[in-house]
Amino acid sequence: MDTSIFEHRESEIRGYCRAYPTVFTAASNARQTDEQGRSYLDFFAGAGVLNFGHNNERMKRAVIRFLEDDGVVHSLDMYTDVKRAFIERFVEVVLEPRGMDHRLQFMGPTGTNAVEAALKLARRVTGRHEIVAFGRGFHGMTLGALALTANDYFRQAGGVPLAHVTRLPFETEPGGGLKALEEYRSRIEDPSSGLNPPAAFVVEVIQAEGGVNVATAEWLHAVQDLAHDLGALFVIDDIQAGCGRTGSYFSFDGMGLDPDIVTLAKGVGGFGTPMAMNLNKPEHDARWSPGEHTGTFRGQGISFVAGREALEYFTDDDLMDAVTAKGQRMRDRLQTLADAHGDKGWEVRGRGMMQGLDVVDGGFAKAVQTAAFEAGLLIGPCGSGGRVLKLIPPLTIPDDDLDDGLDLLAGAIDTALGAA
Ligand SMILES: Cc1ncc(COP(=O)(O)O)c(C=O)c1O
């Protein structure tokens, strides 16, 4: 296995490849193969991009057909037939059944760009600059989104003060919950509090990178009410928890929430090809002027084709029922592991097929990740100090692979405990 070109010529910024030091050559559904022909079960799924598996057969066929027909792969944001087909299907399958009349805004195809666009729009609509974000939140690496991201390692790399953000504790953080929201309300309603009124509250329903922290519907409603009472927009960042990950299209489905803006990216392009998209309430969206948040890659034909195919998974309950069942299977297994090590204070958190095992100690989580890799399983730690083992396999993973991966995880935990 020759990795020298990466080590000598690729930037020091290399990240995931350090945790998974091999050269991958092929991938299918929940498995990846390396140059040595070694197969790995993928419980990381491109950090939540590959909800429908690597090289999803249906999407691959559609993409090959599109390429063979000389479809328009790149179009800036010009109208194309495949973009129309994607939008029409998204409206039919996702928006109309939920009574959502949001407009679809495409931007440069990364999550952080979607967050930037949401911030600009909220600031435009309200004429304010302050944004309320939450502890442990993760929203991306560009300066606006980075200002919302809580993790100090990433913030330090920004190199400039990250301003215009009021930080409140997330529901599950020490000092969080309804009381913290009420305290903020009473402070900001005091004309001498010195606080700037916010343009938006930006929140993840389940903080993914932040450690699989799950908010309740009650708390999210309180955030939404507070936002609206203060004349601010309520923005849900569903970039990692959306697109079916939690057992429904949006992570907030069934909660009766009414977000002004929803940010989507990662899984929305279906095939692992990039796309980002915000859903803006029409009265807010009307405040944009043409091209104000422009970008070269806002019309990725392959992503529209594959993303449209992905929507077919949401026309019946089959995949979402399977996600609920597999999510429970993951949760039960993690709970068994936590119970088996009851003295260590481990905790299982998550919903659907985003489940985390908080092993309290980041060094230990890292040792488990390494042992898992050596045993043939890809997992990614997250959370404060990297203490949470997050499992986000493709939603399409076969039951046997899921069970095998959970067995490998249990073995990796034993290996890491043995080495400790
Ligand atoms: C909730 C959330 N928002 C935003 C982002 C940033 O997305 P990207 O890495 O595509 O810029 C991420 C990435 O992990 C995320 O999980």
Image (cartoon, rainbow, N blue to C red):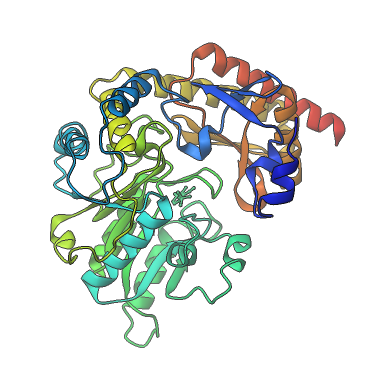
Give the left or right position of residue 97, taking residue 178 as reference.
Answer: left
Instruction: Tell me residue 258's x, y (percent).
Output: 22, 50
Instruction: Tell me residue 274's x, y (percent).
Output: 40, 42
* Residue ID at (34%, 38%): 268
Relative to 362, does residue 379 appear above or below in the rendering?
above
| Number of residue marks | 0
Q: Identify the residue at the far top of this view.
A: 400
Give the left or right position of residue 32, taking residue 189 as reference.
Answer: right
Asked whether 261 or 276 is in front, the reply is: 276
* Residue ID at (72%, 41%): 366
Q: Identify the residue at the far right of this view.
A: 419
Please tell me in which quadrant of the rendered image residue 40 appears.
top right
* Residue ID at (14%, 41%): 99
Please tell me in which quadrant of the rendered image residue 37 appears.
top right
Q: Quadrant of the C terminus?
A: top right
Q: Quadrant of the N terminus?
A: top right
Relative to 414, does residue 19 appear above or below in the rendering?
below
Residue 361 makes an appearance in the image: no
Give the left or right position of residue 155, taking residue 288 as reference.
Answer: right
Instruction: Tell me residue 379's x, y (percent).
Output: 62, 33
Give the left or right position of residue 105, taking residue 223 as reference.
Answer: left
Relative to 41, does residue 99 appear above or below in the rendering?
below
Residue 150 makes an appearance in the image: yes
Instruction: Tell me residue 304's x, y (percent).
Output: 28, 36
Asked whether 138 or 4 is in front, the reply is: 4
